[in-house]
């Protein structure tokens, strides 16, 4: 897990450096801070969404939609709706790597922000 986290972190830093170079044609500290915020926030958002889905928060909603709407031209019975796996069972990847990467990027952003304002 540590190796994947380090590789993802360095890949994220490379992307964080390349995006301002491509869009603004220069790399300033302010552009680096802004890009790091968006990329770190994206990783944090995806990891928190994954945690929420894995906790079973949306299972009741998806079960209700299965019972209410028609599937393949016919209504589902209660037994057929229960046989479909819950949404929390379908998400199987580890969210910790995305969470730690997002937090690390946001820490880098805060350090850069402190340098920018001092």
Image (cartoon, rainbow, N blue to C red):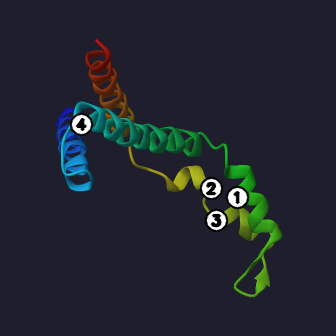
| Vertical side of 64 occupied by 49: above or below | above
Mark sitting on residue 62: 1
At which x and y percent is residue 20?
A: 25, 47
On-image quarter of the N terminus: top left
**Circle 4 Cα neighbour tier, 10 Å, few/some/many (<14 / 14–19 / ≥20):** some
Q: Earlier in the sequence, mark 1 or mark 4?
A: 4
Q: Spatial distance from mark 3 to mark 1, Cα to Cα?
A: 10 Å
Marks 4 & 3, CB-CB < 8 Å contact: no
Mark sitting on residue 86: 2
**Closest to the observer: 45 or 82?**
45
Residue marked by disc 4: 5
Q: Spatial distance from mark 1 to mark 4, Cα to Cα?
A: 32 Å
At which x and y percent is residue 7?
A: 17, 41
Q: Is residue 116 left or right of residue 99?
A: left
Marks 1 & 2, CB-CB < 8 Å contact: yes
Residue marked by disc 3: 84
């Amino acid at each position: 897990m540590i190796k994947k986290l380090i590789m993802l972190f360095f890949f994220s830093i490379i992307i964080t450096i390349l995006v301002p170079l491509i869009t603004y044609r220069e790399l300033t500290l302010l552009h680096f801070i802004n890009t790091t915020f968006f990329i770190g926030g994206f990783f944090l958002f995806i990891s928190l969404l994954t945690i929420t889905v894995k906790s079973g928060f949306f299972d009741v909603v998806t079960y209700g939609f299965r019972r209410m709407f028609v599937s393949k031209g016919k209504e589902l019975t209660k037994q057929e709706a229960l046989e479909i796996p819950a949404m929390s069972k379908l998400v199987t990847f580890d969210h910790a790597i995305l969470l730690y990467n997002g937090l690390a990027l946001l820490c880098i952003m805060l350090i850069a922000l402190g340098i920018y304002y001092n």
